[in-house]
Image: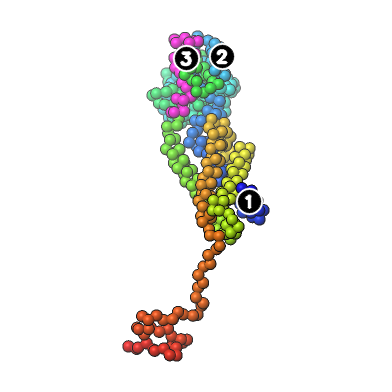
Amino acid sequence: MRATLRWAHSDLRTHRGEALFLVLATAGVVVSLLLATALFGYATNPWQRVFTQAHGAHVTLHTTVSADADRLTGLEGVRSVAGPYPTSSLTLSSQGGRASVEVRGTRDRPEVGRPIVTSGHWLDPATPDGVVLESNLARALLTAPGDTLSVPGTARRFTVVGVADSAEPRFRPGERAGLVWALPSAVADPDGQVIGLRLTDPGDTGYAVQRAVTELGAGAIGEVATWQQARAEAQGDNRLLGQVLGLFGLGALVAAGFAVHGAITTRIRGHLRDISVLKAIGFTPGQVVRVFLIQHLGYALLGAVAAAALTEALGGSVPGRLGDAVDVWQGLPGHTAALFVVPVGAVLFIGATTGLAAWRAGRVPPVPVPRPAAAPAGRLRRAGPWRRAHGRVPAGPYGVPRPGRRAPPTA
Protein backbone atom coordinates (compact mmCIF):
# COMPACT_ATOMS: atom_id res chain seq x y z
CA MET A 1 0.00 0.00 0.00
CA ARG A 2 2.86 2.35 0.79
CA ALA A 3 4.43 1.77 -2.62
CA THR A 4 1.04 2.35 -4.26
CA LEU A 5 0.61 5.72 -2.54
CA ARG A 6 4.17 6.74 -3.35
CA TRP A 7 3.69 5.98 -7.03
CA ALA A 8 0.35 7.83 -7.07
CA HIS A 9 1.99 10.85 -5.43
CA SER A 10 4.85 10.76 -7.93
CA ASP A 11 2.41 10.49 -10.83
CA LEU A 12 0.41 13.44 -9.48
CA ARG A 13 3.52 15.61 -9.34
CA THR A 14 4.52 14.60 -12.84
CA HIS A 15 1.10 14.98 -14.48
CA ARG A 16 -0.53 17.85 -12.63
CA GLY A 17 -2.29 19.13 -15.74
CA GLU A 18 -4.03 15.81 -16.39
CA ALA A 19 -5.09 15.55 -12.75
CA LEU A 20 -6.48 19.09 -12.78
CA PHE A 21 -8.39 18.34 -15.98
CA LEU A 22 -10.03 15.26 -14.44
CA VAL A 23 -11.01 17.18 -11.30
CA LEU A 24 -12.48 20.03 -13.34
CA ALA A 25 -14.29 17.61 -15.65
CA THR A 26 -15.90 15.84 -12.70
CA ALA A 27 -16.82 19.15 -11.09
CA GLY A 28 -18.40 20.34 -14.33
CA VAL A 29 -20.43 17.15 -14.67
CA VAL A 30 -21.70 17.33 -11.08
CA VAL A 31 -22.52 21.06 -11.29
CA SER A 32 -24.45 20.43 -14.50
CA LEU A 33 -26.39 17.60 -12.89
CA LEU A 34 -27.22 19.66 -9.79
CA LEU A 35 -28.38 22.62 -11.90
CA ALA A 36 -30.41 20.24 -14.06
CA THR A 37 -32.03 18.86 -10.89
CA ALA A 38 -32.91 22.39 -9.78
CA LEU A 39 -34.35 23.25 -13.18
CA PHE A 40 -36.22 19.95 -13.24
CA GLY A 41 -37.99 20.75 -9.98
CA TYR A 42 -38.59 24.33 -11.09
CA ALA A 43 -40.12 23.37 -14.44
CA THR A 44 -42.06 20.21 -13.60
CA ASN A 45 -43.40 21.23 -10.20
CA PRO A 46 -44.52 24.87 -10.29
CA TRP A 47 -46.89 24.24 -7.40
CA GLN A 48 -44.02 23.30 -5.09
CA ARG A 49 -42.19 26.46 -6.15
CA VAL A 50 -45.23 28.62 -5.34
CA PHE A 51 -45.84 26.78 -2.06
CA THR A 52 -42.26 27.36 -0.96
CA GLN A 53 -42.19 31.02 -1.90
CA ALA A 54 -45.64 31.70 -0.43
CA HIS A 55 -45.07 29.78 2.84
CA GLY A 56 -48.29 27.99 2.05
CA ALA A 57 -50.68 26.66 4.66
CA HIS A 58 -50.59 22.90 5.15
CA VAL A 59 -54.27 22.86 6.17
CA THR A 60 -56.96 25.32 5.02
CA LEU A 61 -60.23 25.34 6.98
CA HIS A 62 -63.48 26.92 5.80
CA THR A 63 -65.52 27.59 8.89
CA THR A 64 -68.62 29.48 9.95
CA VAL A 65 -68.44 33.15 10.82
CA SER A 66 -68.86 32.42 14.55
CA ALA A 67 -65.91 29.99 14.78
CA ASP A 68 -63.17 31.14 17.16
CA ALA A 69 -59.89 30.84 15.24
CA ASP A 70 -57.82 31.90 18.24
CA ARG A 71 -58.43 28.50 19.82
CA LEU A 72 -56.31 26.90 17.09
CA THR A 73 -53.18 28.87 17.91
CA GLY A 74 -52.18 26.71 20.85
CA LEU A 75 -52.78 23.35 19.20
CA GLU A 76 -49.94 20.86 19.33
CA GLY A 77 -48.04 20.75 16.04
CA VAL A 78 -49.39 24.07 14.74
CA ARG A 79 -46.58 26.53 14.06
CA SER A 80 -48.64 29.53 12.93
CA VAL A 81 -52.22 30.45 12.05
CA ALA A 82 -53.29 32.69 9.18
CA GLY A 83 -56.58 34.54 9.44
CA PRO A 84 -59.44 34.28 9.94
CA TYR A 85 -60.37 36.02 6.70
CA PRO A 86 -64.05 36.78 5.97
CA THR A 87 -65.31 35.24 2.73
CA SER A 88 -68.27 35.71 0.47
CA SER A 89 -69.42 33.55 -2.46
CA LEU A 90 -70.22 35.47 -5.65
CA THR A 91 -70.47 35.05 -9.39
CA LEU A 92 -68.26 37.32 -11.45
CA SER A 93 -68.77 38.09 -15.11
CA SER A 94 -66.35 39.38 -17.72
CA GLN A 95 -66.00 39.38 -21.46
CA GLY A 96 -64.51 35.90 -21.20
CA GLY A 97 -67.47 34.38 -19.34
CA ARG A 98 -68.68 33.77 -15.82
CA ALA A 99 -67.16 32.01 -12.84
CA SER A 100 -68.10 31.22 -9.27
CA VAL A 101 -65.60 32.80 -6.91
CA GLU A 102 -64.77 33.11 -3.25
CA VAL A 103 -64.02 36.71 -2.32
CA ARG A 104 -61.59 36.78 0.61
CA GLY A 105 -61.26 39.96 2.61
CA THR A 106 -57.74 40.98 3.61
CA ARG A 107 -55.83 44.23 3.69
CA ASP A 108 -52.20 43.05 3.77
CA ARG A 109 -50.68 40.00 2.21
CA PRO A 110 -50.52 37.30 4.90
CA GLU A 111 -47.24 35.67 5.90
CA VAL A 112 -48.82 32.19 5.68
CA GLY A 113 -50.30 31.48 2.27
CA ARG A 114 -48.82 34.68 0.88
CA PRO A 115 -50.03 35.24 -2.73
CA ILE A 116 -47.25 35.73 -5.27
CA VAL A 117 -48.19 38.70 -7.48
CA THR A 118 -47.27 37.96 -11.10
CA SER A 119 -48.74 41.06 -12.76
CA GLY A 120 -50.17 44.33 -11.51
CA HIS A 121 -49.92 45.12 -7.80
CA TRP A 122 -51.45 44.18 -4.47
CA LEU A 123 -54.58 45.73 -2.98
CA ASP A 124 -54.47 49.47 -2.38
CA PRO A 125 -56.89 51.39 -0.11
CA ALA A 126 -56.88 54.09 -2.80
CA THR A 127 -58.86 51.64 -4.99
CA PRO A 128 -61.69 50.35 -2.74
CA ASP A 129 -63.21 48.20 -5.47
CA GLY A 130 -59.87 46.69 -6.51
CA VAL A 131 -59.41 42.91 -6.48
CA VAL A 132 -56.56 40.49 -7.11
CA LEU A 133 -57.42 37.32 -9.02
CA GLU A 134 -55.83 33.93 -8.71
CA SER A 135 -53.90 33.22 -11.95
CA ASN A 136 -56.00 30.26 -13.11
CA LEU A 137 -59.19 32.22 -12.56
CA ALA A 138 -57.77 35.19 -14.47
CA ARG A 139 -56.93 32.94 -17.43
CA ALA A 140 -60.42 31.43 -17.38
CA LEU A 141 -62.07 34.87 -17.40
CA LEU A 142 -59.56 36.28 -19.93
CA THR A 143 -58.86 39.24 -17.69
CA ALA A 144 -55.76 41.27 -16.85
CA PRO A 145 -54.97 44.21 -14.55
CA GLY A 146 -57.15 47.16 -15.54
CA ASP A 147 -60.19 45.13 -16.60
CA THR A 148 -63.58 45.44 -14.90
CA LEU A 149 -65.64 42.57 -13.49
CA SER A 150 -69.35 42.71 -12.72
CA VAL A 151 -71.69 40.78 -10.45
CA PRO A 152 -74.67 39.62 -12.54
CA GLY A 153 -77.99 40.96 -11.27
CA THR A 154 -76.42 43.77 -9.26
CA ALA A 155 -74.73 47.08 -9.91
CA ARG A 156 -71.48 46.04 -8.20
CA ARG A 157 -68.25 46.40 -10.17
CA PHE A 158 -64.73 45.28 -9.37
CA THR A 159 -61.51 46.52 -10.92
CA VAL A 160 -58.74 43.98 -11.41
CA VAL A 161 -55.54 45.48 -9.99
CA GLY A 162 -53.38 42.35 -9.97
CA VAL A 163 -53.00 38.64 -10.71
CA ALA A 164 -51.30 36.30 -8.22
CA ASP A 165 -50.28 32.65 -7.87
CA SER A 166 -51.56 30.69 -4.89
CA ALA A 167 -50.66 27.30 -3.46
CA GLU A 168 -54.30 26.53 -2.58
CA PRO A 169 -56.40 24.20 -4.76
CA ARG A 170 -56.88 25.96 -8.08
CA PHE A 171 -60.02 27.00 -9.87
CA ARG A 172 -61.97 24.32 -11.75
CA PRO A 173 -65.12 25.39 -13.62
CA GLY A 174 -68.17 23.69 -12.15
CA GLU A 175 -66.12 21.97 -9.42
CA ARG A 176 -64.15 24.49 -7.38
CA ALA A 177 -64.68 28.22 -6.96
CA GLY A 178 -61.95 30.64 -7.93
CA LEU A 179 -60.09 32.74 -5.39
CA VAL A 180 -60.34 36.54 -5.29
CA TRP A 181 -58.63 38.81 -2.75
CA ALA A 182 -60.31 42.09 -1.87
CA LEU A 183 -60.30 44.67 0.89
CA PRO A 184 -62.41 43.79 3.96
CA SER A 185 -64.84 46.56 3.03
CA ALA A 186 -65.68 44.66 -0.18
CA VAL A 187 -66.93 41.70 1.86
CA ALA A 188 -69.92 43.45 3.40
CA ASP A 189 -71.97 40.35 4.21
CA PRO A 190 -69.60 37.42 4.80
CA ASP A 191 -71.01 33.92 4.76
CA GLY A 192 -67.95 32.25 6.28
CA GLN A 193 -64.27 32.59 7.04
CA VAL A 194 -61.01 30.90 6.09
CA ILE A 195 -58.25 29.80 8.47
CA GLY A 196 -54.84 28.58 7.37
CA LEU A 197 -52.64 26.35 9.53
CA ARG A 198 -48.92 25.91 8.98
CA LEU A 199 -47.68 22.80 10.79
CA THR A 200 -44.40 21.87 12.37
CA ASP A 201 -44.50 18.49 10.61
CA PRO A 202 -46.21 18.64 7.18
CA GLY A 203 -46.97 14.94 7.38
CA ASP A 204 -49.29 15.36 10.38
CA THR A 205 -52.15 16.92 8.44
CA GLY A 206 -54.63 14.22 9.43
CA TYR A 207 -53.85 14.63 13.11
CA ALA A 208 -54.04 18.42 12.85
CA VAL A 209 -57.47 18.25 11.16
CA GLN A 210 -58.78 15.95 13.89
CA ARG A 211 -57.56 18.32 16.60
CA ALA A 212 -59.10 21.32 14.82
CA VAL A 213 -62.46 19.56 14.48
CA THR A 214 -62.35 18.60 18.15
CA GLU A 215 -61.46 22.16 19.18
CA LEU A 216 -63.98 24.04 17.01
CA GLY A 217 -66.70 21.41 16.69
CA ALA A 218 -67.76 19.38 13.68
CA GLY A 219 -70.56 21.80 12.81
CA ALA A 220 -68.21 24.78 12.61
CA ILE A 221 -66.05 23.38 9.80
CA GLY A 222 -67.52 23.18 6.34
CA GLU A 223 -64.57 22.30 4.06
CA VAL A 224 -61.00 21.13 4.62
CA ALA A 225 -58.19 21.36 2.06
CA THR A 226 -54.69 19.97 2.61
CA TRP A 227 -51.44 20.66 0.83
CA GLN A 228 -51.26 17.04 -0.40
CA GLN A 229 -54.54 17.46 -2.27
CA ALA A 230 -53.41 20.71 -3.88
CA ARG A 231 -50.08 19.17 -4.92
CA ALA A 232 -51.74 16.09 -6.44
CA GLU A 233 -54.09 18.26 -8.51
CA ALA A 234 -51.30 20.56 -9.71
CA GLN A 235 -48.81 17.81 -10.57
CA GLY A 236 -51.18 15.82 -12.77
CA ASP A 237 -50.70 18.07 -15.81
CA ASN A 238 -46.90 18.08 -15.54
CA ARG A 239 -46.31 14.34 -15.19
CA LEU A 240 -45.48 13.76 -18.86
CA LEU A 241 -43.13 16.76 -18.92
CA GLY A 242 -41.36 15.41 -15.85
CA GLN A 243 -40.87 12.00 -17.46
CA VAL A 244 -39.45 13.55 -20.64
CA LEU A 245 -37.03 15.80 -18.73
CA GLY A 246 -36.03 12.91 -16.49
CA LEU A 247 -35.24 10.77 -19.54
CA PHE A 248 -33.08 13.52 -21.02
CA GLY A 249 -31.34 13.98 -17.68
CA LEU A 250 -30.53 10.26 -17.51
CA GLY A 251 -29.15 10.40 -21.04
CA ALA A 252 -26.99 13.39 -20.10
CA LEU A 253 -25.61 11.47 -17.10
CA VAL A 254 -24.71 8.48 -19.27
CA ALA A 255 -23.07 10.74 -21.88
CA ALA A 256 -21.07 12.55 -19.20
CA GLY A 257 -19.95 9.22 -17.75
CA PHE A 258 -18.74 8.00 -21.14
CA ALA A 259 -16.87 11.27 -21.68
CA VAL A 260 -15.04 10.90 -18.38
CA HIS A 261 -14.42 7.23 -19.13
CA GLY A 262 -12.84 8.17 -22.46
CA ALA A 263 -10.57 10.71 -20.79
CA ILE A 264 -9.44 8.19 -18.16
CA THR A 265 -8.91 5.46 -20.77
CA THR A 266 -6.77 7.79 -22.86
CA ARG A 267 -4.72 8.71 -19.83
CA ILE A 268 -4.13 5.05 -18.92
CA ARG A 269 -3.08 4.24 -22.47
CA GLY A 270 -0.51 7.00 -22.22
CA HIS A 271 0.97 5.28 -19.17
CA LEU A 272 1.50 1.84 -20.70
CA ARG A 273 5.29 2.14 -20.37
CA ASP A 274 4.95 3.13 -16.70
CA ILE A 275 2.59 0.21 -16.11
CA SER A 276 5.09 -2.19 -17.66
CA VAL A 277 7.82 -0.81 -15.40
CA LEU A 278 5.58 -1.22 -12.35
CA LYS A 279 4.95 -4.86 -13.22
CA ALA A 280 8.62 -5.43 -13.95
CA ILE A 281 9.57 -4.28 -10.43
CA GLY A 282 7.00 -6.56 -8.79
CA PHE A 283 3.55 -4.93 -8.93
CA THR A 284 0.75 -7.47 -9.35
CA PRO A 285 -2.19 -6.86 -11.72
CA GLY A 286 -4.44 -6.25 -8.70
CA GLN A 287 -2.09 -3.59 -7.37
CA VAL A 288 -1.98 -1.85 -10.74
CA VAL A 289 -5.78 -1.81 -10.89
CA ARG A 290 -5.91 -0.49 -7.33
CA VAL A 291 -3.42 2.28 -8.10
CA PHE A 292 -5.46 3.75 -10.94
CA LEU A 293 -8.80 3.15 -9.22
CA ILE A 294 -7.81 4.91 -5.99
CA GLN A 295 -6.14 7.73 -7.86
CA HIS A 296 -9.09 8.53 -10.13
CA LEU A 297 -11.68 8.01 -7.40
CA GLY A 298 -9.80 10.62 -5.38
CA TYR A 299 -9.95 13.03 -8.31
CA ALA A 300 -13.67 12.35 -8.78
CA LEU A 301 -14.44 12.77 -5.08
CA LEU A 302 -12.55 16.06 -4.93
CA GLY A 303 -14.38 17.39 -7.99
CA ALA A 304 -17.80 16.25 -6.71
CA VAL A 305 -17.35 17.86 -3.27
CA ALA A 306 -16.13 21.10 -4.84
CA ALA A 307 -19.09 21.11 -7.25
CA ALA A 308 -21.64 20.55 -4.48
CA ALA A 309 -20.14 23.30 -2.32
CA LEU A 310 -19.96 25.70 -5.26
CA THR A 311 -23.58 25.06 -6.28
CA GLU A 312 -24.85 25.44 -2.74
CA ALA A 313 -22.94 28.67 -2.10
CA LEU A 314 -23.12 30.47 -5.43
CA GLY A 315 -25.94 28.79 -7.35
CA GLY A 316 -28.56 31.28 -6.20
CA SER A 317 -26.47 34.25 -7.35
CA VAL A 318 -26.59 33.19 -11.02
CA PRO A 319 -28.61 35.83 -12.86
CA GLY A 320 -31.86 34.95 -14.57
CA ARG A 321 -34.19 31.98 -14.30
CA LEU A 322 -31.38 29.59 -13.36
CA GLY A 323 -30.61 31.49 -10.15
CA ASP A 324 -34.31 31.60 -9.28
CA ALA A 325 -34.55 27.86 -9.84
CA VAL A 326 -31.62 27.21 -7.49
CA ASP A 327 -33.12 29.50 -4.82
CA VAL A 328 -36.42 27.66 -4.98
CA TRP A 329 -34.73 24.26 -5.09
CA GLN A 330 -32.76 25.02 -1.93
CA GLY A 331 -36.04 25.45 -0.06
CA LEU A 332 -37.66 22.24 -1.30
CA PRO A 333 -37.96 19.19 0.98
CA GLY A 334 -35.76 16.95 -1.21
CA HIS A 335 -32.93 19.46 -1.59
CA THR A 336 -30.59 17.88 0.97
CA ALA A 337 -31.10 14.38 -0.39
CA ALA A 338 -30.45 15.50 -3.98
CA LEU A 339 -27.35 17.43 -2.92
CA PHE A 340 -25.96 14.18 -1.51
CA VAL A 341 -27.29 11.60 -3.99
CA VAL A 342 -26.22 13.36 -7.21
CA PRO A 343 -22.48 13.72 -6.34
CA VAL A 344 -22.34 10.23 -4.84
CA GLY A 345 -24.01 8.75 -7.92
CA ALA A 346 -21.60 10.59 -10.21
CA VAL A 347 -18.58 9.37 -8.22
CA LEU A 348 -19.83 5.77 -8.26
CA PHE A 349 -20.49 5.95 -12.00
CA ILE A 350 -17.02 7.35 -12.64
CA GLY A 351 -15.58 4.67 -10.35
CA ALA A 352 -17.29 1.95 -12.40
CA THR A 353 -15.94 3.30 -15.68
CA THR A 354 -12.50 3.78 -14.14
CA GLY A 355 -12.55 0.20 -12.86
CA LEU A 356 -13.08 -1.10 -16.40
CA ALA A 357 -10.19 0.96 -17.77
CA ALA A 358 -7.97 0.01 -14.82
CA TRP A 359 -8.77 -3.68 -15.35
CA ARG A 360 -7.47 -3.35 -18.89
CA ALA A 361 -4.36 -1.67 -17.52
CA GLY A 362 -3.81 -4.63 -15.22
CA ARG A 363 -3.56 -6.93 -18.26
CA VAL A 364 -0.60 -5.02 -19.72
CA PRO A 365 2.43 -7.38 -19.89
CA PRO A 366 5.53 -6.56 -17.80
CA VAL A 367 7.65 -6.15 -20.95
CA PRO A 368 6.04 -4.37 -23.89
CA VAL A 369 5.65 -6.74 -26.85
CA PRO A 370 7.30 -5.14 -29.90
CA ARG A 371 5.12 -4.77 -32.92
CA PRO A 372 6.12 -6.83 -35.99
CA ALA A 373 8.36 -4.74 -38.20
CA ALA A 374 6.92 -3.88 -41.59
CA ALA A 375 8.77 -4.80 -44.78
CA PRO A 376 11.12 -2.06 -46.01
CA ALA A 377 9.61 0.22 -48.54
CA GLY A 378 10.45 -0.54 -52.18
CA ARG A 379 11.20 -4.28 -51.60
CA LEU A 380 8.80 -7.00 -52.62
CA ARG A 381 8.52 -10.51 -51.36
CA ARG A 382 9.74 -13.36 -53.52
CA ALA A 383 7.13 -14.64 -55.86
CA GLY A 384 5.52 -17.83 -54.69
CA PRO A 385 5.31 -21.07 -56.70
CA TRP A 386 1.75 -20.37 -57.77
CA ARG A 387 2.66 -16.93 -59.12
CA ARG A 388 5.72 -18.34 -60.93
CA ALA A 389 3.58 -21.10 -62.43
CA HIS A 390 1.22 -18.55 -63.91
CA GLY A 391 3.95 -16.29 -65.14
CA ARG A 392 3.25 -13.51 -62.67
CA VAL A 393 6.82 -12.52 -61.97
CA PRO A 394 7.44 -9.12 -60.42
CA ALA A 395 8.86 -6.74 -62.96
CA GLY A 396 11.80 -4.46 -62.45
CA PRO A 397 11.95 -0.73 -62.94
CA TYR A 398 10.06 0.66 -65.94
CA GLY A 399 8.19 -2.62 -66.45
CA VAL A 400 11.27 -4.56 -67.71
CA PRO A 401 11.51 -8.14 -66.34
CA ARG A 402 14.31 -8.69 -63.93
CA PRO A 403 17.33 -10.67 -65.16
CA GLY A 404 16.99 -14.41 -64.92
CA ARG A 405 13.17 -14.22 -64.77
CA ARG A 406 10.87 -15.47 -67.50
CA ALA A 407 8.70 -12.77 -69.04
CA PRO A 408 4.97 -13.36 -68.86
CA PRO A 409 3.43 -14.67 -72.06
CA THR A 410 1.65 -12.15 -74.26
CA ALA A 411 -1.75 -12.63 -75.75
Could you tell which of marks 1 and 2 lies nearer the N-terminus? 1
Residue annotated with mark 3 = 210
Magenta segment: 209-233
Determine the image quadrant of residue 343.
Answer: top right
CB atoms at circles 1 and 2 under 8 Å apart?
no
Cα separation between marks 2 and 3: 15 Å
Q: Amino acid at mark 3?
A: Gln
Residue farthest toward the bottom in the current orientation of the protein: 403
Residue 192 position in % (x across, y down) = 48, 14
Q: Residue at x 46, y 40 (%)?
A: 246
The Cα–Cα distance between marks 3 and 1, rounded to whole angstroms, is: 67 Å
Q: Position of residue 355 (x, y in %)?
A: 52, 49
Q: Foreground: 311 or 232?
A: 311
What amino acid does circle 2 point to? Thr
Find disc 1 in the rendering and name its residue.
Answer: 3
Q: Amino acid at mark 1?
A: Ala
